[in-house]
Image: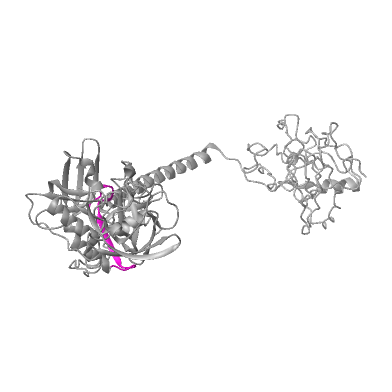
Amino acid sequence: MDDGKPSGPRTKWWSRPSTDRDRPAGPEEDGAAATGVADASGTAPAGPGGTAGTTAGERLPHTTPDGDYTPAPPAAAPPPAADLGTPAPAEPAPPAAEPHVHRTQPLHAPDEYSTPPYGGPGPWAPAPPVQRPVATPAHGTPVPPPYAGTDGHGTAAPPVAAAPAQGGQEHHTDPWPPPPPPHTVPQQHPVPQPPGQTPQQTSQWMRYDPWGAPRQPLSHPGPGQGVDDVRPRKARRGTVLVGAALLALLAGGIGGGVGAYVERNGGLTTVELPQSGRDAGGRAPDSVAGIAASALPGVVTLHVNGSAESGTGTGFVLDDRGHILTNNHVVAPAGSNGDITVTFSGGESAAAEIVGKDSGYDLAVVKVTGVSGLTPLPLGNSDNVRVGDPVVAIGAPFDLSNTVTSGIISAKERPITAGGEKGDGTDVSYVDALQTDAPINPGNSGGPLVDAEARVIGINSAIRAADSGSGLDGGQSGSIGLGFAIPINQGKRVAEELISTGKATHPVIGVTLDMEFTGDGAKVGGKAAGGASAVTEGGPADKAGIRSGDIITEVEGQRVHSGEELIVKIRAHRPGDRLGLVLTRGGKELSMTLTLGSASGT
């Protein structure tokens, strides 16, 4: 191993070389002089012929001892070193000596005093600048080609080459070698060169030329640039920047103008999208649009203001005299001295007054005066309705007038009860209702439910709300697809009675029911209020033979499961109608027929 000791010649600080003119040249030294070994400063040592002062890039004719000269062969340089202070590889063998050429007498005789440019540099030669070592690049970092300076005439010279040592000739060494680097960069193998050429020297210590023109520091390789070389480039750069700025301003102005035009005019060209033409507006009479067009003129919106509360609902015109049918709970807030305003589908408004109302049926009739051109709605027959028939509901949900929704009849004869806020049962409504999935919301109450021919088959009165159960006044959570309407057959009879007498009559059987009974069917109570008998003496039930404790299970062939259902079934008929009943007494089933009586409503 080398143990870190350099194997090749070291560079040395520049000093004036010796001429050795008193010592004759031997055969070996003559070969060495002919080759011209360069020291660390980049200057070849003087030989017998006095060639000191020449650079690696420019060699003067070499003078031989006999007075002839021959051009010096190109100097061979060691392989490029990886870093300063790194042991250099063994120097390659010197090239074979060139054959002797014809020697010609030089124009000037050799100067025994070695005066420049024919001798070595004298004591007046300027000292070179202090050389600064550069940092060792990391392994694998590309290194730019070495800078060789100029040849003394301002022309860039090729890289400096150093000749290998000849046959045992000593090399000048540096008495103060730099410390070894912290890590050793792997040696690079020399690249084979063509005959007559030597590898380039990459060390910056071999690049100084004391006779060359001034140039940039060694830390910035490349040809020198003067002030005259820089100013034209700055001028050109300024011109380019000004041109680019003007071009940007011009492009910005054009772009801004185009953008403003597009924003104001909607584009550079007029855009027209395809669209169908206007139609005549006709719709099939049985379509939802046709039904709505036919029924809307007869639907009104009611705004009720009382001393304690107010409300909004819907109604529809019954005749050309101004009678309007709606729900009792819609007009109830007005009380005895409240205000009721009716707004028609066209936007006209008129004051209205109550003609009659009945809480048991949840129906009321109001009348407007001084209004002409009314459009009464035709009344259908609720007995003809079948489950699945299409229906349309019209009203003012949440005070949104002229709202149309559609659906089907979901069920028939659905017994529902509503009201009961008073607690005495006088305000409870019993309805044998039509069920629909047409969306009904608060504000739809009193509006018409019409069939496919725009005929009224029910009065929208109640919804099943998810948070408040069922009720004719509905809930505030909105429709869940469970709406209920009073059949128009019942509504027609009650409306006629209210218009004629201001009151409605209720069909009765003359019994008091036990509303606490939890079994199946409607049970006749033991005692009435005040201790009287539960069966009214001389009433329809008494005449038919019904007794206290009997349980009625069927009415006209329809099963009855509770007292409320029995009331609903009875009120679905008119007073004087004959009903067939089925009841159980002491475990035995009995059948009987009775004629409904009449009672005045409230």
Using the image as rendered, state which of residue 19 and residue 559 is in the foreground: 559
Spot occupied by residue 189 in the image (x, y as percentages of width and height): 81, 53
Colour option used: one colour
Is 393 in the magenta?
Answer: yes
Using the image as rendered, state which of residue 89 and residue 448 is in the foreground: 448
Q: Mark yes or no: residue 345 visible.
A: no
Question: For the view shown, which residue lies furthest in the top direction?
Answer: 124
Task: Please give the name of the residue rendered at 34% of the width and 68% of the height, measured from the top-left corner.
Answer: 388
Occupied quadrant, residue 210: top right
Spot occupied by residue 35 in the image (x, y as percentages of width and height): 82, 48
Task: Please give the name of the residue rendered at 6% of the width and 49% of the height, measured from the top-left corner.
Answer: 370
Spot occupied by residue 503 in the image (x, y as percentages of width and height): 17, 50
Task: Please give the name of the residue rendered at 22% of the width and 50% of the height, measured from the top-left corner.
Answer: 601
Q: Quadrant of the N terminus?
A: top right
Q: How many marks?
A: 0
Q: Mark yes or no: residue 226 visible.
A: yes
Is 407 in the magenta?
Answer: no
Occupied quadrant, residue 406: bottom left
Spot occupied by residue 485 in the image (x, y as percentages of width and height): 29, 57
Magenta residues, as a range?
385-402
Using the image as rendered, state which of residue 13 and residue 421 is in the foreground: 421
Left or right: 254, with 517 as reference point: left
Image position of 500 with respect to 182: above or below: below
Left or right: 121, with 573 as reference point: right
Using the image as rendered, state which of residue 503 and residue 543 is in the foreground: 543
Question: For the view shown, which residue lies furthest in the right direction?
Answer: 1
